[in-house]
Image: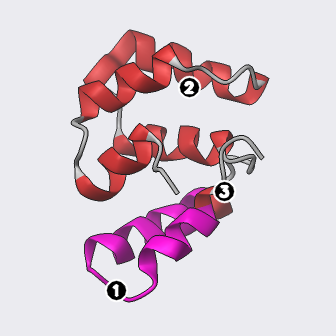
Amino acid sequence: MELHPLDGYLLDGRPGKADAIAAALRDRSPDAKAQPFYRALEALGARAADEALLALRVVLGGKPADDKAIIAARAARAAVKSDEPGAREAYLRSVGTIGE
């Protein structure tokens, strides 16, 4: 499975933050729940908090951007960064699959 640029940035730092944001803005979802995040990214660019990128990624995966979902995604991201076994799969489950 190919990672979305936001996943690449959030998990591995590749692409860089500005490039991941530019990619997200180039290939926008029509989902109304994603639009406030896109507006924030347009206004703030790379100054946007990683938490906002994580929340957008959750929305793009078809999940609600509520506290429970964001906390789960944040924990899964931290597990990936700590190289815990199975963490990448857990992260992808927590943020959902784009386009399904």
Q: How is the image coloured?
A: secondary structure
Residue at the disc numbered 1: 84
* Numbered disc 1: secondary structure: loop
Relative image position of residue 93 (x, y in whole percent): 63, 68
The residue beneath circle 2 is 37
Left or right of 69? Residue 89 is left
Which class describes the residues within 10 Å of circle 3: few (<14), some (14-19), or many (20+)?
A: some
Q: Position of residue 14 (x, y in %)?
A: 23, 45
Could you say which quadrant of the image residue 81 lies in? bottom left
Which residue is located at x 43 percent, y 78 percent? 87
Circle 2 residues within 10 Å: few <14, some 14–19, many ≥20 = some
**Residue bounds of the magenta highlight:** 70-94
Q: Quadrant of residue 12?
A: bottom left
User: What amino acid type is highlighted by mark number 1?
Assistant: Glu
Residue that numbered label 3 is attached to = 96
Q: Earlier in the sequence, mark 2 or mark 3?
A: 2
* Disc 2, SS: helix
Nearer mark to the viewer, of 1 and 2: 1
Give the residue at x 67% y 41%.
59
Residue 86 in magenta? yes
